[in-house]
Image (tube, rainbow, N blue to C red):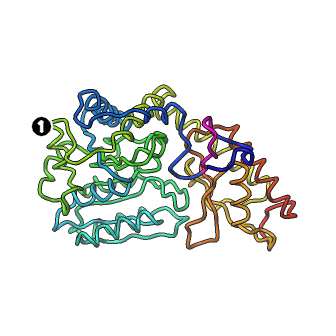
Amino acid sequence: MIATGSIRAASETGDALLLTPGPLTTSRSIKEAMLHDWGSRDAAFVQINREVMERLPGIVNAGATHVTVPMQGSGTFAVEAMLTTFVPSDGEVLILINGAYGQRARKILEIARRRTVIHETPEDTPPDLVAVERVLASTPSITHVFAVHCETTSGILNPVQEIGALAAKHGKGYLIDSMSAFGALPLDANAIHADAIAASSNKCIEGVPGLGFVICRKDVLEAAKGNASTLVLDLHDQWTVFQKTGQYRFTPPIHVIVAFHQALTEFFAEGGQPGRGGRYTENCRVLVEGMRALGFRTLLQDQLQAPIIVTFHMPGDPRFDFQRFYDALKERGYVIYPGKLTVADSFRIGCIGRLDRTHMQGALAAIRDVIAGFGMTSAAMAA
């Protein structure tokens, strides 16, 4: 933790505010939920875990058709479990890539020896739906389509509904990485024909890291027996054991799950997806308008920007140094994120977590102070 005297902004527990894509700033009550111990087979914990699993499909309007399969580990564990459980050894996946998480899916499938077809666009460009349909029509061996809902490499919102319509039209399974969007952006699993949606505890539900989960169409999950290429990431086996015993096959992250249960309670108290998404949308608006007023330029056009994380071009002024900028903001209680792009030199600022418009306004004031300390009156790009 930063020394208290150096923090000008802080969360309700005194920590610096995390303006990142996750892990995120969490509430005091979510942290306090982890102050107790439970046995993994104790009836109280089993009930808490059951409630978590039962609540999640409703967030994507799928309570009657889909089930939740939790997976110990980070979000990538859930994505790999999804891909390697639902894609059989003779399957072939059309991967839509416009950032690091699409690239990660390709690597997962290559290691698992699943065949892939790649449709790749630049990090600031959504998939070309005409080209996607052309690929689907001309490649009958494709069994599944994989897309990233919000690609946090840039913050771009991908057209998951339109992609789902194409997958359904051509009779393909549809797998979605909704890691950084689940709970914040509207998503109807049945309307978009999603077989499975992967997400995690430490994003827009505002829990802590350590639990991934996949919301799966029940009939498709039942048919996936024997597909998995690993023991620990076998969603079918994990689900089957839950049905029989209510238990995890291997040690669960108990404290993470209990904190996630509290986070879901707070999520629904805020109004569910509309309430949570509305707060993040306002955070994003305040941030973007304020940064543009300071001369910073966003990577994405407004219609492509998800209210999750915003990518900004580095200023062209030679007095601007990102490491000094980062360190100075951290001293003031704000932690931002380096860029991850190949198309532009950039940095990112997140809009999610236990943050509101006043926190974003405070961050903007700190940024204004820091660039003034660099001798810059504006962050406008040099010619």
Q: Position of residue 89 (x, y in %)?
A: 16, 66
Q: Is residue 146 magenta?
A: no
Circle 1 residues within 10 Å: few <14, some 14–19, many ≥20: few
Say which of 374 and 254 sits in front.
254
Q: Is residue 125 above or below residue 272?
A: below
Residue under pointer 1: 244
Q: In the visual, does 194 lie left or right of 238?
A: right
Per the rendered image, the range of residues in magenta is 11-19
Q: Could you say whether the residue bearing mark 1 is in a helix, strand or loop? A: helix
Q: In the visual, does 202 lie left or right of 169?
A: right
What secondary structure predominates along the stretch shown in magenta?
loop
Q: Amino acid at mark 1?
A: Lys
At x 52% / y 66%, what residue is drawn?
123
Q: Is residue 127 above or below residue 117?
A: above
Q: Is residue 54 above or below residue 158?
A: above
Say which of 367 and 380 sits in front.
367
So how many labels did they put on this image? 1
Q: In the visual, does 161 lie left or right of 71?
A: right
Res 94 quadrant in image:
bottom left
Q: Position of residue 149 (x, y in %)?
A: 43, 53
Q: Position of residue 35 (x, y in %)?
A: 44, 34
